[in-house]
Image (tube, rainbow, N blue to C red):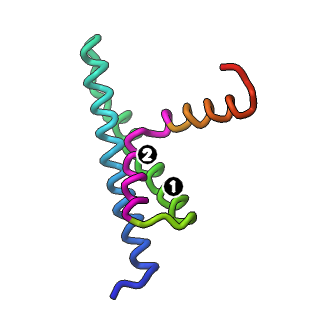
Amino acid sequence: MIKHTDLINTLIACVGGLGLIAGLLRYVDDWREKRKEKPIEFSVLEAMWEALSGGVTAIGVFWILQGNGVNELAAVGISFMAAYLGVRIIAYYVKKFLDNRLGAKS
């Protein structure tokens, strides 16, 4: 039987891997959309950045959800979606939420 800590470590490794894949998918999807408007080159550095930020985002969201007692499978799914959305979009919506909450006009 797997210990609880081994299960969590395995899930974190899987979530990180899924996050890397999700970040890379996001970059390729954005690149294909931008390429329709004007020809641009595929940047390996930007693709790696999106993949790494997606992986870190997925692990961070997974830890937050685990800390709040969310089911592991649901936490993995939500983490994958957060990784696909990426850090930029999540930060945009958090800023928008805080601006609305604090009464600032955007």
The prevailing secondary structure element of the residues shown in magenta is helix
Expressed as whole percent of the image width and height from the top left, the position of residue 8 reads 43, 72
Three-letter amino acid code at the position of disc 2 = Ala
In the picture, the disc for residue 106 is none
Residue drawn at (46%, 79%) of the image: 5
Q: Quadrant of the N terminus?
A: bottom left
Q: Name the outermost residue toward the top.
A: 38
Expressed as whole percent of the image width and height from the top left, the position of residue 100 reads 68, 29
Disc 1: which residue: 60
Q: Nearer the viewer, residue 83 or 100?
A: 100
In the picture, the disc for residue 82 is 2
Residue drawn at (44%, 80%) of the image: 4
Taking the image as shown, residue 3 lies to the left or right of residue 21, namely: right
Taking the image as shown, residue 94 lies to the left or right of residue 83, namely: right
Taking the image as shown, residue 50 lies to the left or right of residue 97, namely: left
Residue drawn at (50%, 54%) of the image: 61
Q: Earlier in the sequence, mark 1 or mark 2?
A: 1
Q: Which stretch did the figure color magenta?
A: 73-89
Residue drawn at (36%, 42%) of the image: 23
Determine if the magenta segment contains residue 23. Answer: no
Three-letter amino acid code at the position of disc 1 = Gly
